[in-house]
Amino acid sequence: MPERRTIPIVPTEPDLKAADHPGDASGATGGIGARAAAASPGKPRRGMSDRLGLDLGKLKGLIPVARRHLEGELRDAAYVRTGGRVDITKPRRIYGILNERCNLKCQGCDYWRLEHYVDELPAAEWIRVLKEIKDFVGPFHINFSGGEPLLKKGLFDILNYCRDNEILAGMTTNAIILKDRQAAQLVEAKLFSLNVSLDGSTAATHDLQRGVKGSYAKVLRTIDLMKEHSAKTGIKVPIVIKPTVSRLNFREMPELVRMVAGMGVNGILFQPINDWGTEEIQDLWIRDVDSLRPVVDEIVAMKERGYPILSADWHIRDWVRHFNKEPVSNTPDRLRRAGLASPPPPAPASVADPEGVQCWVGLTTMHIKTDGTVVNCHTLDPIGNVRNQSVRDIWHGEVGRQRRAQTVKCTIGCTENCTVKRTVRQSFQGAMQLLKI
């Protein structure tokens, strides 16, 4: 394990020179940026996408991926209902962690405290792995993150490969170093979605949690830049605001929802902070659950009134249980919310809990880490490494099979979005929100 630095959180300006890489061209623009509406050129002739209010180009690319997801539901059901005896599962929730380097000092994160970084997969290796995944699973969606992916050398080679090979690529960014040229490149890469970390409705809250003064203003500027280039090119990149919910900001979440509704972005997706055992997390943990309850109720009510909240309402309500650290009870109600009409039949105790399944990551999810290590869940040991194994062999290997048997019995009930199994209707509604223009 790399050594960890215990550096106190001091909001300071980051060293932006770290973002300068060959091939990652950048150019500065001043201020937070004009709103996209002010920067838009004259009104173009309205096409079918404009009339329907949907990005039909992205819809066309989404259809084969959606078909694979529906097939995946059947594969999952076969596994659960046979107690793991029939294992024809394939990963369909795929994440690529491009690097560990970051230019923020987020209070709940360890990356910036590392003395040494692991040896990163170069861009050419990522492209090889992406081809392997497509050969194995067919059309798929992948979300790239870091560290900060904008610091990754060869990032646009990776994203452009996805664009040119019909791989739906999304990216999660802290959004503070995006220059005008990089914004143009992201738009030209035709990202399926851009998740932007914004942790509060005020600069004071966001900058405190992210550890760098001035980062809030830079996030808003990045959103403006993306909207401006989308307007200029006619290429729509859906933007999703993704706050990490903690003790520092949970009271601001309703106001952040209102703010997002007026920003001209596609929606907001909450990620409650999880307790992975680090000291820093303890200071961010929400212990005043009595104050959290009305916030949860207000957010759920806002979702019902039509605010662009992408998180499932039951997932939001689960925050109370999560921060109370209550164990999960795999009741029929939870199973219905997860997409099963009723609990599966009893299975051998060594394979699956007969009361049902709470965690689906072993059946659905593949995280490819910076050095090529593959995990289903960050709390569990790896199931392989793409440097020396094929994606197919990793998934169907003995360790991968053991991990599936292990995860379907998990009752920790963490609130990571990768563990949330949505119904077909919920998935459709979320996709439509991303396709809005």
Image: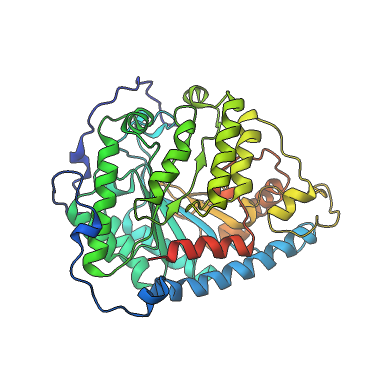
Q: Is residue 375 visible?
A: no
Residue 161 horizontal/vertical position (percent)? 33, 67
Q: Nearer the viewer, residue 385 or 262?
A: 262
**Quarter holding residue 379:** top right
Q: Nearer the viewer, residue 254 or 54?
A: 254
The residue positioned 34% from the left and 22% from the top of the image is: 9
The residue positioned 57% from the left and 31% from the top of the image is: 292
Image colouring? rainbow
The residue positioned 69% from the left and 58% from the top of the image is: 339
301 versus 290 height, above or below: below
Determine whether, in the image, residue 187 is placed left or right of residue 42.
right
**Total numbered badges shown on the rendered structure:** 0
Residue 108 horizontal/vertical position (percent)? 44, 30
**Quarter holding residue 70:** bottom right
Q: Is residue 287 visible?
A: yes
The residue positioned 32% from the left and 31% from the top of the image is: 207
233 versus 303 height, above or below: below
Determine whether, in the image, residue 261 is placed left or right of residue 323.
left
